[in-house]
Image (spheres, grey):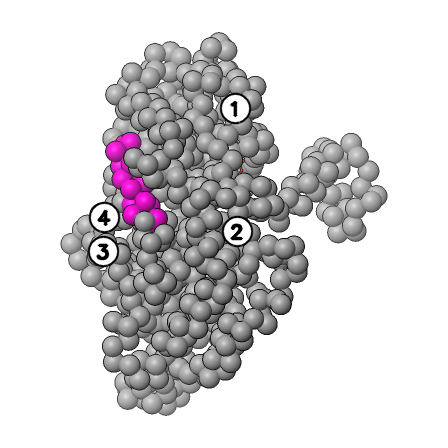
Amino acid sequence: MTLTTTPAWQALASHAETLRPQHLRNLFAADMQRFEHFSLNRHGLLLDYSKQRVTGKTMTLLRNLAEAADFTGWRRKMLDGEPINHTENRAVRHVDLRAGDTAPVEVKDVLQRMAGFCEQIHDGSWRGFSGERITDIVHIGIGGSDLGPRMAVHALAAWQQPDLHVHFVSNLDSADLASTLTRLNPRSTLFIIASKTFTTLETMANARTARNWIRAAASDEQAIARHFVAASSNLAATAEFGISPKNVFEFWDWVGGRFSLWSAIGLPIALAVGFGNFARLLAGAHDIDEHFFTAPADSNLPLTLALIALWNTNFLDIHSHGVFPYSHSLALLPSHLQQLEMESNGKRANRDGLAIDYPTNPILWGAAGTNGQHSFFQLLHQGGAPVASDFIALGHSDFPLPGHHSGLLASCLAQSSALAFGQTVDEARAAGIPEHLLPFRRFPGNQPTTTLVLPELTPFTLGQLIALYEHKVFCLGVLWNLNSFDQWGVELGKQLAGRLVPCLRGEASTDALDASTRGLIEHLRQFRT
Ligand code: F6P
């Protein structure tokens, strides 16, 4: 029996027939307590899903689906360290990285070494090859070894340590590294080479160029030890690169790249905001772990987010998901979530290797409010494409200035309200819009949204927020019966790129290539001679 023919799925399908034509206006009119009925709270983190196109019955049927998918059993398997990433035969244990006193010994050991390293950088006892204090950290990594720490450092700008600048380089395009290095002094710059595998093309190319940059300035091989540390699970490769074992912060194959910011990959966060704040970030995530592993289905925040996502995707045919943090500091959150959700759940084979015949993860995108209101929101309101969105608001600003925050919050609430309820022609007329403009002032509404409110943006609440989305991803994988923890889909392009390099250099024949790729290579070759 495939997922879509199970009784739980079929019950949702027939329920969707009655709910699809309903407008959020009707749902709100039918239940004056919709906010109370469709919102959850965990230690101050509020999740309001009353503007989703669901009723109590929808949620009950969705929870039945979770039960039929053995959500509780899969959650237990993850906690017990079973190899639920079965295509790579790996456990999925990122929650162990933030388990505090109950974390495994090897995790505590690395955290302690990270704390010691941060102290040396912050108190100036770690010196560069010429005896200068380190003022700039360049974190080189890509994908999961970049997006999480980059987002967190940006998000915690209000907690930034003085006199230390943390930069991120990820792109193979030399413009990324070159434009960063021109601003820096090799004597006072330290590189973190962050790569789980320590084989990733982009990261290794940037790391080698950075090593040459230090060598050229120091003309002494010993300088490498003062200017390079690594976060990796491949200790043989870090040694071969020339990084001293005492400068390698290890993590393990049971930490997926997009779940790795809690591991040594988070070193730039600890350097940027201090190790104590990094520990608070871990504590925030642990708080959500405790909630996720113990809360019943009807009050479980990550499961609720996942059920809503599945409902929108598979029963309301909404395949686009916007994330709009009304927080400038959270501007990079959509990029992090893009990898977290799309690399995890954008799959076409189920756990048994059978073709999936239902849509999986929607396209996730987004930008910080209010900026998005002046670019793409027009389409959300009147363009006709169905989009489900998450709005994220902060109770307090992390950089308060008089007269800003109320306007920001009002904009956030106004947008989700306009998306939900729209504006009818009669309402526009009553508001005094002239007749000839009425067609242009109609807003259909019925675009579903969820609003998350953090009391304030701190290391702890940021940890809560990220962990919330991580567990949402896990739940969706369970519901869709797929493995959220592998990423075979990125392999094909990598293999092809490897084969095309010699063609671009004119060292291999292009005859076997498709006409477009061959034509483009021939065109590009003229620029390379
Ligand atoms: O894009 C594929 C991927 O394997 C991601 O999953 C991972 O986060 C990224 O590459 C970087 O890998 P690594 O940390 O091994 O350099």
The quadrant of the picture occupied by the N terminus is bottom right
Q: Residues within 10 Å of mark 2 (few under 14, many from 20)?
A: many
The quadrant of the picture occupied by the C terminus is top right
Residue located beneath label 4 in the image: 398
Residue located beneath label 1 in the image: 235
Residue located beneath label 2 in the image: 484
Q: Is residue 458 magenta?
A: no
- Lateral position of residue 290 relative to residue 494, left or right: left
Up/down of 499 relative to 127, above or below: below
Up/down of 130 relative to 86, above or below: above
* Amino acid type, mark 2: Ser
Residue 437 visible (yes or no): no
Name the N-terminal-most of marks 4 and 1.
Answer: 1
Q: Which mark is nearer the camera, 2 or 4?
A: 2
Foreground of the two, 142 or 72: 72
Q: Which mark is nearer the camera, 4 or 1?
A: 1
* Amino acid type, mark 1: Leu
Foreground of the two, 227 or 52: 52
- Please give the label number shown on residue 44: 3
- Segment tinted magenta in the rendering: 272-289
SS under mark 4: loop
